[in-house]
Amino acid sequence: MRFRAKIVDIGCLNHFTRVINTIAKLAKTCTLRLTTDKLYFILSDKVANGGVSMWCELSQGNFFDEFQMEGVAAESNEIYLELAPENLSRALKTAQNAKAVKVKLTNKHCPCLTVAVELPSLSSNSRVVTHDIPVGVIPRKLWSDFREPRVPDFDVSIYLPVLKTMKSVVERMKNLSNTIVIEANLNGEMNLKIETDLVCVTTHFKDLGNPPLVSEDGSQFSAQERDPESMAEARIDIKKLLQLLAGQQVNPTKALCSIVSKRIVHFILLHEDVSLQYFIPALA
């Protein structure tokens, strides 16, 4: 299997760096899945263990000037690697004003993603800084563990308020409690609340708007069976929510939150060429 890619456009490079920085804030290790037209960063902590899951999808054509890969076999033309996104983030920090960045799958004592950063220099020779990031190659028999998470039918889906505002609210609440209740209804209202023996604090957001509901088979269904005023709610770990809000460097054009009452909160952040899904399981 082979993989090599190159970014020359500085705007694309900065955007790619922001995506990687965001992922590094959300996951210590994750799986990088490469296909001919997309890159996926996947974190599938088993929800049974109270873990979060993440699914981030990028179209390679919007980032890379060159992109070549050969998967493990013709009929499964994909590569799955395990890596620490923080290492990739650190390598890209040296590429702030690079002329080009090349990424390549190499084998140096162990499999590596080698990031070669070509820096401008005053003489005619350019300087190249190379980072070897160790990766684990995930065997094909385990690939099924990294499928896109199935999205259950939600009770409520709602557009999020400005993430910066939400972050500052959650940051203040974090000092009072380890858990937070998110509730929302089909009237565009969302509340963030914490309840402890000593204090009960609620922040209300309204007029957020609700996206049209689509069922699993793709048909739109009306939420008439649900009272638009009634709240769906889930109590989640406040640190996990803050991790998502604080790690954001992609500035999504659309941010949604969907709730399956008392089971899971699903966030989806969309930016032209990146979609990030993040699932936080509800606490009992």
Image (tube, helix red, strand yellow):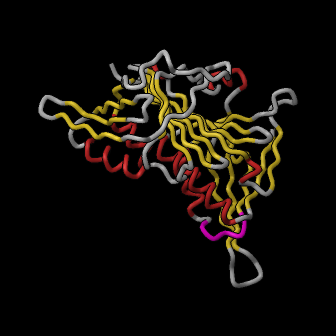
Is residue 173 one of those drawn in magenta? no
Residue 49 visible from this viewpoint: no
Q: What residue is at 72 percent from the left and 45 percent from the top?
A: 59
Q: For the point 76% across and 78% down, which residue is it? A: 125
Looking at the rendered structure, the number of numbered marks drawn on it comes to 0
Residue 54 seen: yes
Q: Nearer the viewer, residue 157 or 222?
A: 222
Classify 42 as above or below 274.
above
Q: Quadrant of the N terminus?
A: top right
21 left or right of 69 in image? left
Q: Quadrant of the C terminus?
A: top left
Percent coordinates x, y for residue 144 in the rendering: 67, 21
- Asked if residue 27 lies left or right of residue 9, the reply is left
Pinpoint residue 4: horizontal percent, then vertical percent: 78, 50
Range of magenta residues: 96-100
Taking the spot 56% from the left edge, 21% from the top edge, the residue there is 222
Front residue (pair 219, 114): 219
Residue farthest along the bottom direction in this orientation: 122
Q: Residue furthest top?
A: 225
Q: Is residue 98 magenta?
A: yes
For the point 67% across and 56% down, which residue is it?
115
Given residues 56 and 210, the one toward you in this image is 210
Figure check: 30 above or below 271: above
Seen in the image, is 31 located left or right of residue 229? Answer: right
**Main SS class of the magenta portion in the image:** loop
Quarter of the figure with residue 170 = top left
Measured from the top left, where is residue 210 in percent x and y?
Answer: 50, 34
List x then y, in percent, for residue 221: 59, 20
